[in-house]
Image (spheres, grey):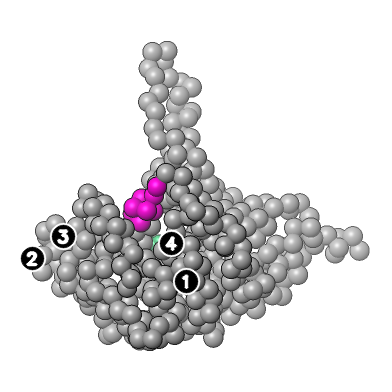
């Protein structure tokens, strides 16, 4: 997210009116000024509106640790951190690309996923620890790769609805943004012809988020192959955001993009934040999956960039081999089982609400997008109105879709205990009923 909050920018604005004659405002990077509606900024504004008589239920931001009694209860590998503390490596600077043991653990982790999903090539493709760069969360991986591939006038293809961090990271890296649409009527898969139509000679890469935030889609092997073929024809890499890799349920499966690396080069991004539920550990990775060697320059530029950057804390890196080991399968299975139940609970609850339209039940990640029929709700003209009024009357926090590029949709995070999700649906149902236009006219 943007390092400068909306509040602090406004404070500075107000401050300038009170400044003396002589003092002159010092300028800063104007790109940051254009970062107007970060998710956190909008969430903070919505949060101030709640109805004091009702406890707030937050379906807004996607923090899996927000409910410590539920998904966020302490994972089994927490102890590996205390053993890492006693390791002498943990006090030193880690090498620029990460501790060798930690890079190896990420390579092995990705290779296991590739072995389990051999839909791609003739033989499963494997990465090595030299392909892995450790970063401070997926956030740093995203900023890094966009900076590395940036070139004058170049553009990157982003999904819409999307994840706003990519918009900001493109702007900061000086990369133009172009959008391809994820289509609700096609289980959120994109139209390959549209992707080809928005690309041109200056297209540098295509971003695919799978399993998908915000739609909850888990893309089919066939769709992922289509994306690989487009990238091959355009001679560009795929930036595969697989932060929700392995979080699939309800019939969905996770196909790592690197399965198709023999067709087009892939830069895989991952993180401990979501599947391992330790977002505060700030450990992510970027893996160059390049069997054909066309990313050699990108790889070298990434090395140069990482050499002048600083990655995750050594102590967290030292714990990584045991965090990523097979020993935690039970924990992951349980989380996926809970999320499946949550997705089902929210989907069934929202389906009953007339003014909301749910296209498909989520099959991955922790989110669902729902269309709001504003024409049927009195006093609600936009997704922002919906979010504000819902918060004012029912203390339910949701994310307006316009922030993600989809007007009159809202995003729901469903990683909450099913009882709370049922309460939230009940409150939303009565909110919508009170405002149904045809009901009032009868
Ligand atoms: C949460 C998230 C990230 C950021 O992950 P961090 O490791 O917390 O930086 C990146 N991409 C997507 C799609 C996410 O949902």
Q: CA separation, marks 1 and 3? A: 33 Å
Callout 2: few (<14), some (14-19), or many (20+) C-alpha neighbours within 10 Å? few
Q: Which of the 4 image quadrants contains residue 429?
A: bottom right
Q: Name the residue under label 4.
A: 236
Indicate which disc, 2 or 4, sits on the residue closer to the N terminus: 2
Image position, residue 253 (x, y; %): 48, 82
Q: Can residue 86 be seen here?
A: yes
- SS for dot 1: helix
Quadrant where the image shows the C terminus:
bottom right
Residue 416 can be seen, yes or no:
no
Tag on residue 228?
1
Q: Which residue is under mark 3?
A: 95
- Who is closer to the viewer here, 384 or 269? 269
Q: Does the residue labelled 3 lie within 8 Å of ligand 1?
A: no
For the residues labelled 2 and 1, say whether their Cβ atoms are less than 8 Å apart: no
Q: What stretch is highlighted in magenta?
A: 144-151
- Which label's residue is closer to the chain start, 4 or 1? 1
- Quarter of the image for residue 240 reads bottom left
Q: Residue 88 carries which label?
A: 2
């Amino acid at each position: 997210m943007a390092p400068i909050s909306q509040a602090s920018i406004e404070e500075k604005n107000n401050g300038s009116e009170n400044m003396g004659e002589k003092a002159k405002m010092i300028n800063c990077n104007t790109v940051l000024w254009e970062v107007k509606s970060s998710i956190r900024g909008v969430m903070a504004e919505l949060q101030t509106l709640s109805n004091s008589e009702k406890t707030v239920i937050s379906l807004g931001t996607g923090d899996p640790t927000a409910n410590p009694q539920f998904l966020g209860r302490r994972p089994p590998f927490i102890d590996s951190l205390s053993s890492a503390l006693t390791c002498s490596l943990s006090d030193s600077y880690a090498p620029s690309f990460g501790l060798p043991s930690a890079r190896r653990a990420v390579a092995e982790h990705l290779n296991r996923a590739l072995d389990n999903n051999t839909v791609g090539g003739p033989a499963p493709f494997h990465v090595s620890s030299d392909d892995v760069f450790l970063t401070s969360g997926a956030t740093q991986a995203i900023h890094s790769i966009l900076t590395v591939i940036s070139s004058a006038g170049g553009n990157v293809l982003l999904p819409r609805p999307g994840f706003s961090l990519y918009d900001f990271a493109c702007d900061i890296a000086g990369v133009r943004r172009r959008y391809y649409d994820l289509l609700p009527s096609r289980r959120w898969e994109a139209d390959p012809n549209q992707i080809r139509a928005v690309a041109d000679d200056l297209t540098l890469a295509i971003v695919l988020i799978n399993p998908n935030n915000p739609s909850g889609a888990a893309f089919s092997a066939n769709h992922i192959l289509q994306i690989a073929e487009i990238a091959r024809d355009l001679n560009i890499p795929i930036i595969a955001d697989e932060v929700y890799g392995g979080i699939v349920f309800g019939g969905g499966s996770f196909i790592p993009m690197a399965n198709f690396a023999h067709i087009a080069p892939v830069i895989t991004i991952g993180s401990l934040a979501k599947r391992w539920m330790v977002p505060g550990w700030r450990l992510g990775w970027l893996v160059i999956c390049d069997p054909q060697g066309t990313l050699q320059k990108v790889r070298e530029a990434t090395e140069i960039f990482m050499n002048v950057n600083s990655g995750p804390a050594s102590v967290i890196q030292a714990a990584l081999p045991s965090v990523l080991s097979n020993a935690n399968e039970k924990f992951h299975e349980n989380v996926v089982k809970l999320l499946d139940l949550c997705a089902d609970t929210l989907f069934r609850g929202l389906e009953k609400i007339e003014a909301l339209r749910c296209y498909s039940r989520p099959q991955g990640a922790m989110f669902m997008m729902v269309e709001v029929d504003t024409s049927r709700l009195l006093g609600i003209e936009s997704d922002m109105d919906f979010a504000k009024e819902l918060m004012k009357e029912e203390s339910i926090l949701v994310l307006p879709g316009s922030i993600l590029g989809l007007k009159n949709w809202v995003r729901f995070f469903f990683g909450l205990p099913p009882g709370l999700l049922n309460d939230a649906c009940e409150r939303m149902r009565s909110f919508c009923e009170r405002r149904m236009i045809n009901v009032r006219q009868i």
